[in-house]
Image (tube, rainbow, N blue to C red):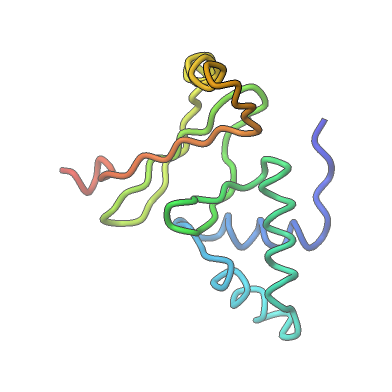
Amino acid sequence: MRKRATARQQDVLNVLNACDKPMTAYQILEELQADEPDIAPPTVYRTLSALTGQGRAHRLESIKAFVPCRCSHAESVPVLAICEDCGSVEEHDGSGLLLPLTKLTDRSAFCAERHIVEIHGRCGTCAA
């Protein structure tokens, strides 16, 4: 069962959901400072860490930015398709990848804690 989001977590999620592109922690901070000028970067980083840990947001490792989670990934692999042209991010359910990834890491006794697949390219609109 997913825990209820704190007020701060909900504020950060609202900022992420209002933007159609990935956001850096500092972009999120700037948005939050409009209503709360004294908010500091560590607060945003702690909140983002909690949200990613809860599966409510994803950190795009390759571009050091965040997006809200739009799918349920309880027993799945988020597959994030990142457009190099417009910056949009499509989230896909990679359930079919979980078993092959687990078999791959089991060979070396690697104990995976989470799975996130990032794919870079161009979205359908930009590729057309």
The structure residue drawn at horizontal position 52% and vertical position 16%, both measured from the top left corner, is 107
Residue furthest left as drawn:
128
Residue furthest bottom as drawn:
37
- Total marks shown come to 0
As drawn, 17 above or below 103: below
**Percent position (x, y) of residue 18?**
55, 59
Most foreground residue, 108 or 34 = 108
Q: Quadrant of the N terminus?
A: top right
Q: Quadrant of the C terminus?
A: top left
**Percent position (x, y) of residue 105?**
53, 22
Most foreground residue, 2 or 111 = 111
Kindly indicate the quadrant of the structure image that contains residue 76: top right
Asked whether, in this view, residue 98 is left or right of residue 86, the answer is right
**Percent position (x, y) of residue 56?**
67, 44
Asked whether, in this view, residue 42 is left or right of residue 29, the answer is right
Asked whether, in this view, residue 105 is left or right of residue 126, the answer is right
The structure residue drawn at horizontal position 67% and vertical position 57%, both measured from the top left corner, is 48
As drawn, 75 above or below 124: above
**Percent position (x, y) of residue 29?**
63, 73
The structure residue drawn at horizontal position 64% and vertical position 22%, both measured from the top left corner, is 75
The structure residue drawn at horizontal position 44% and vertical position 39%, both measured from the top left corner, is 80
